[in-house]
Structure formats: C-alpha cells, structure tokens
Image: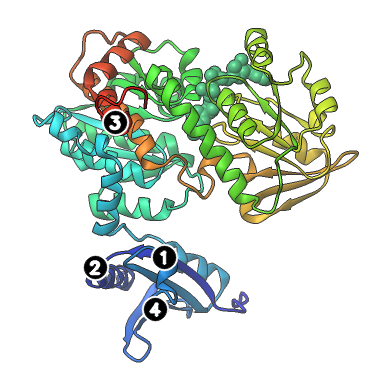
Amino acid sequence: MSASVKLPLVHAVDIVAGEGEAQRLLGDLAARLAVDPGVQRMDWEEASASWLCTLANGGRGRLTLAAPADPGSVVESTHCFVAAFEQGTPAAAEDFFAAVRQLPFTLTEIASTLSELPLTGSLPDRWPNKPLGDVGVLLTIHHMRDFLILVDSLLALGVEPAHMTVIDKEYPYAHTHRVNAHLVQRHGIAVWRYRDLRAGIEDHIDRVAAAGKRSVVMDDGGYVMPTVLRELPDRAGHFVGLVEQTTSGIRKVEGLQLPLPLVSVAESDMKSMIESYGIADAAVRNTLRLLPDEKFEGQPALVLGFGRIGHEVARVLETRRMRVAVFDSDITRLVAAHEEGFLTGLSLEDLVRAHRPRLVIGCVGSRSFGLREARLLPPQAFLVSTTSRNFEFALDELREGSIAVTDRGVLGTGYQLADGPGICVLGHGMPINFHHAESLSNRYVDLVLAGLAVGAVALAGGDERLRPGHNVAATNEILSESGIVVDYYRLYGPTAGAGRG
Ligand SMILES: NC(=O)c1ccc[n+]([C@@H]2O[C@H](COP(=O)([O-])OP(=O)(O)OC[C@H]3O[C@@H](n4cnc5c(N)ncnc54)[C@H](O)[C@@H]3O)[C@@H](O)[C@H]2O)c1
C-alpha cells in the first residue's frame, strides 16, 4: 500500500466573479467530478459549506469557495477557490488536483480581458461576413488569457469550434490550466499537448478534411509545418497557409521548401518596431520579480545576441543602471552595439572573463552559452533566457559539469559547477517573460494577436500577393491596410492635434 500524504495539500486560486457566478463555477466543477470514474461520490456539507469528494481509491478531497480575509488587498469581487486534499496517496492527490485545476474563466474575467484587447476583440466588426467560415485553424499560440480573446474572435469570424485545434506548448504560464479548461469546456475546442504534436496535427487534418475544408496554421515557434513537411509530407496540401509570429519559427522553416504562403508577422515592421521593447521589458521585469532581494544596479550584465529583442534588453538593463556588455557573433551587430556604447568583444570567452557578469540574458534564439563560459562567471550569477523553449543555454553541459544540480522551485535550477561557481538558471532556461507570468500586458500584445488574425483572413481569402514561401513585404502591406496599426495609434498615440506624444 502506498504512503498517504502527511499534511493536507492545498490548491488555492483567486477568481473574479459575482457571488452567483462564483457559486455556479464551484457547482459545475462538483458536477464534473461527480461523473469522473475516479470519484465515488460528491457530498455537499452544509456545516462547512463545502463539497466533500470521496475518491474510488479511498482518498478524500474538499472544495470550498472562500472570501478573502483582506478584501482591500485583492481586486474587487475576488473569491478564493480552495481545493484541499485531506487523505490518500500522493498519486490520488495528483489526480484530484489535475481535475480541480481545470476551472474555466468567469464571464466577469473574460469581459475584463476583452476590454484590454480592443483591436483583437473588434475584428469581427471589421469583417462581419465570416471570412474564416470555410477553413479550419490549427493554433500554437501561448496559453494565456489574451489568447482566449483571439479564439473568440476567430470563432466569430466563422471558424467552427470543431474545426479548431490548439497545441498547448506546455510552458508554465500563470493561468495555463484555466485557459485549457476554458477552451475545452466553454468552446469544445480540441487541445493537444506539445509532446503529442504529431498526433494532434493528424487528428486536426482528419477532422477538418472530413468536413471538406482546408486549414490555416497560426504558429508561434515553427511547431507545425516542420513536423508536417518532415513526417507527414503527403498531408501538407491540407494547409492553405501559415501565419508565424516569432523569428525562431521563421528559422525553423527557413531550410524547408515551403509549398504554401507564409504570412511573416514575425518579421513585420509592426512586430520588430513595436513589440520587441515590450518583450524585453517584460523579461527584465519578471527576472526582477523572481529575485526581489537582489540588487542589480551598478552590477555587470551580459546580453547575448544584439537582434530585435537583445538590443532592447540591453537598453532596458542600462536604464536599470547595470553595466551592460553585449556579444553577437555577427560582426555588424557587434559594431552597432559598440557604437551604441555597450562593452563588446570579439571573443565571448574573453568578454565573460573580463566583465564577470552577474546577470546573463540570452536573446540569440539558439544555443549560445555553455559550460566553458559558465565556469568564468562570478559566484551566484544568473542565466536568463528570452528564447523559445530551453534552447539558449547548454543545460546538458551544465548538468554534466556540475557536482550538484538543485531544483530551486519557481526560481529555476541551481548548478554547482565542478571547478567553477554556483549559478542559477532562472525559469529552468525557459523564456522568462512566460515563466509563471503572462509576458506583455494585454493592451500591448493586442496588436500582434490582431495581426495574426489579419494574416489568417488574408490566407483564407486567397490574397494574391501571398505566394508560396516568405512574404515579408506583402505581410507589411496587408497589416498596414488592415487598419489595426492606425487604431493602435488612435488608442495609445498622442491625442489629436497634440503633436509629439
Ligand atoms: N520571449 C518572447 O516573448 C519571445 C518573442 C519572440 C521571439 N523570442 C525568441 O527570441 C529569439 C531572438 O529573437 P530576435 O527577434 O531578437 O532575433 P534576431 O534574429 O533579431 O536576433 C538574434 C541575434 O543573435 C545573433 N546571434 C546568432 N547566433 C549567435 C551566437 N551564437 N552568439 C551570439 N549571437 C548570435 C544574431 O546575429 C542576431 O543579431 C527568437 O529566436 C525567439 O526564440 C522570444
């Protein structure tokens, strides 16, 4: 018999809703659990105002809707949803929490998110004739609240929920389980995990092709088309086109003969000129949030890669009063960094040895920093990545070169290097702006999400400017014509007649 949990385990989540809506959410969850084969019975206990959940394997959990003890410290209309596992094995607890974490968002929460994404939310008004009615959509976009507004708009633009599939990239976003629950329970949309990517793609094609439709891919990191072209080449014809929102995705499709048009929001002026600063700022802010007791002012930092994001990260760190060095393997970028006043060098190793950065932020998009360089860092240095997945740092090398590797919880992974310092890879090397966070503010990301939908509409409508392969100039034209950038300017630019904003 496996051991029982020693102390009650608790999962608590704040939800924003009116009293009745919050109670309904709890009731819906209890009803879902009641029909779960692993649950023997659900009983309402009047005295404690909670649902008691008796599991088939003898475990016991409890669901309660509580009020915050200090209402002044939370958003108005906050309720605290508390799930406690009181008795049973750790495995039973895991199953219990996996089920109770699946809480869709409330109407109040969705209305508030919608108000923060006016461009994406109003796209259906722009195209009332349902331009996406004849296509399916396969999406690999970050599982965050903003994404739900994009999904609502795509549905209103005509996509059938049954013809939409979402691949969950499995990053630890702040609200990942709730987003998942919302997609599945509120919309009936198929969600597949990144680890099952190929099966998810095949299932999507079967479902949509059976309805006589083809699909648009909306991707964030080059997940779908490389898999289709390498592993399912005879099914590539199912896709009308691809909208890609990040440069790492562009790099992944670069070596492939793309048989369909790519709307490259990733390389658009809109993305590089407006969004990169926001990503850099969000990355630095989340780094500081995870390390509230550090003092970085006056300390040396190193930025790897002086591209769109790295350039902005270097500038943001400078405004945080750090002494910033930059390394880029491209000599022109290196000169640009030097002429902008950053400390630079032709050899990364020499630069690390001389500068001894306490904070290294990787913005290259592929492996840029390994054990050899890490050994030259000062004690208690932090490695931080903005790159997709965990590709920036040679984590396998760091592990092999360490005498101890410690999981430091939400902070990341600690490596005590043999013949070197103890360092910490923040967020386990995943992009820091998403690590238990939601990256950019919704009002910021609104423009790019709306841009992705504009790209999907252009592809579905067979815009003749979009040819197989890259379409950077046409992407810029289509985004510009759509009016979303003008609307963004109207929302956040200078007030009319005010001149410089
Ligand atoms: N965290 C996020 O929200 C987010 C959003 C978009 C993109 N990204 C990631 O950020 C990465 C960078 O995006 P970008 O738009 O700044 O790309 P970019 O192409 O503009 O910049 C990359 C820079 O790295 C340099 N470089 C390449 N190899 C190098 C090496 N080995 N060492 C040092 N420098 C090297 C290049 O010369 C270039 O200047 C993307 O690949 C993607 O993975 C993250």
Farthest bottom residue in view: 47
Query: What's the residue type where badge 2 is placed?
Result: Glu
The kind of secondary structure element at disc 4 is: strand
Query: What's the residue type where badge 4 is placed?
Result: Cys
Question: Residue at image x 61%, y 24%?
Answer: 364
Quadrant (top left/top right/bottom left/bottom right) for the C terminus = top left
Which residue is the site of mark 2?
21
The x, y position of residue 413, in whole percent, is 69, 48
Looking at the image, do the residues carrying marks 2 and 1 touch, with CB atoms under 8 Å apart? Answer: no
Q: Residues within 10 Å of mark 3 (few under 14, many from 20)?
A: many
Q: Quadrant of residue 98?
A: bottom left
Query: What's the residue type where badge 3 is placed?
Result: Ala
Which residue is the site of mark 3?
450
N-terminal of the two: label 4 or label 2?
2
The response on whether ligand 1 sits within 8 Å of label 4 is: no
Q: Image height check: is 27 above or below 150?
A: below
Which residue is the site of mark 4?
53
Label of residue 74 in the image: 1
Q: Image height check: is 272 above or below 150?
A: above
N-terminal of the two: label 2 or label 3?
2
Looking at the image, do the residues carrying marks 1 and 3 touch, with CB atoms under 8 Å apart? Answer: no
Looking at the image, do the residues carrying marks 4 and 1 touch, with CB atoms under 8 Å apart? Answer: no
C-alpha span from label 1 to label 3? 30 Å
Q: Is 336 left or right of 96, judged from the image as shown? A: right
**Front-most of residues 498 and 373:** 498
Q: Image height check: is 145 above or below 362?
A: below
Q: Is 283 left or right of 268, judged from the image as shown? A: right
C-alpha span from label 2 to label 3? 30 Å
The x, y position of residue 78, in whole percent, is 35, 67
